[in-house]
Image (cartoon, rainbow, N blue to C red):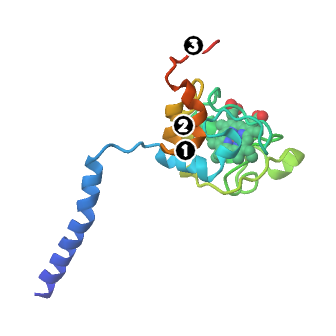
Amino acid sequence: MKISAITSAVALAFVLVSGPLASAQSAAPADPTEAGKAVFKRANCVGCHKWHGNGGGGYGGDALSLRKTELDRQHIIETVTCGRPGTGMPYFARGSYDTAKCYDMSRQDVGERMPPEGGVFLRPNDIEAVADYVLAHIKGRGEPNYDECTAFFGNTSRVCDIYKANATKPASEPSK
Ligand code: HEC
């Protein structure tokens, strides 16, 4: 009796757990880079690079445009992990230049050019996630537009209003 009571409790728990999950999965597929977008906000990449990644003047100096970046996944990961010596781009991995060398340098090697420490430390999988977000939503994009802005903030953000005027006009060819 006892055994079957346990068995049915386990079965019930299984139904409770698998039921809602299974139905959530069959709904609209979630954007796999959502986690990276959350990191982009949490680590305040937004503060320097802006939501659109084009950067501009900020407290960390002129952040380079992530839209125009030529870096590949590996180099984006390295840049976020180690920051960039001699610039305002912070490092986000705990132990960079200490327990883990960066660009083959220790803290002593890098000396005065030591980049600032990020406001939060990110785990390797968070760093990969934010790199994948940059690759999927920022790198290689043209000028930021209204749809992208509302996708970033959710539809209610007034921040996006400045893009509204252009929303109905056909996108102009990027001048290259
Ligand atoms: C305190 C400001 C600041 C923050 C916060 C910041 N960055 Fe940067 N970032 C910079 C600056 C400044 C540069 C330009 C460095 C240079 O001049 O080479 C840069 C450069 C980069 C580059 C190199 C671009 C290239 O083409 O060389 C990448 C990639 C990057 N940042 C990604 C990120 C990500 C992802 C985050 C969040 C985890 C982040 N940054 C947070 C200031 C910041």
Residue 5 at least partly seen: yes
Which quadrant is the N terminus positioned in? Answer: bottom left
> Which residue sits furthest right?
112
List the residue tagged with mark 2: 149
What's the residue at 60%, 41% (across, down)? 159
Q: Earlier in the sequence, mark 3 or mark 1?
A: 1
Amino acid found under the numbered disc labelled 3? Glu
Q: Secondary structure at mark 3?
A: loop
**Residue 69 spot, x, y in % from top left:** 65, 28
Amino acid found under the numbered disc labelled 1? Ser
Tell whether circle 2 marks a residue whose Cβ is less than 8 angstroms from ligand 1: no
Residue 173 image label: 3
Residue 62 image label: none
Q: Secondary structure at mark 1?
A: loop
Rendered view: 53 above or below 13: above
**Residue 157 spot, x, y in % from top left:** 54, 44
> Which residue sits furthest left?
1
What's the residue at 74%, 34% (across, down)? 56
Rendered view: 27 above or below 16: above
Q: Earlier in the sequence, mark 3 or mark 2?
A: 2
**Residue 83 spot, x, y in % from top left:** 73, 44
How far is mark 2 from mark 1, CA to CA? 8 Å
Instruction: Give the quadrant of ligand 1.
Output: top right
Residue 157 image label: 1
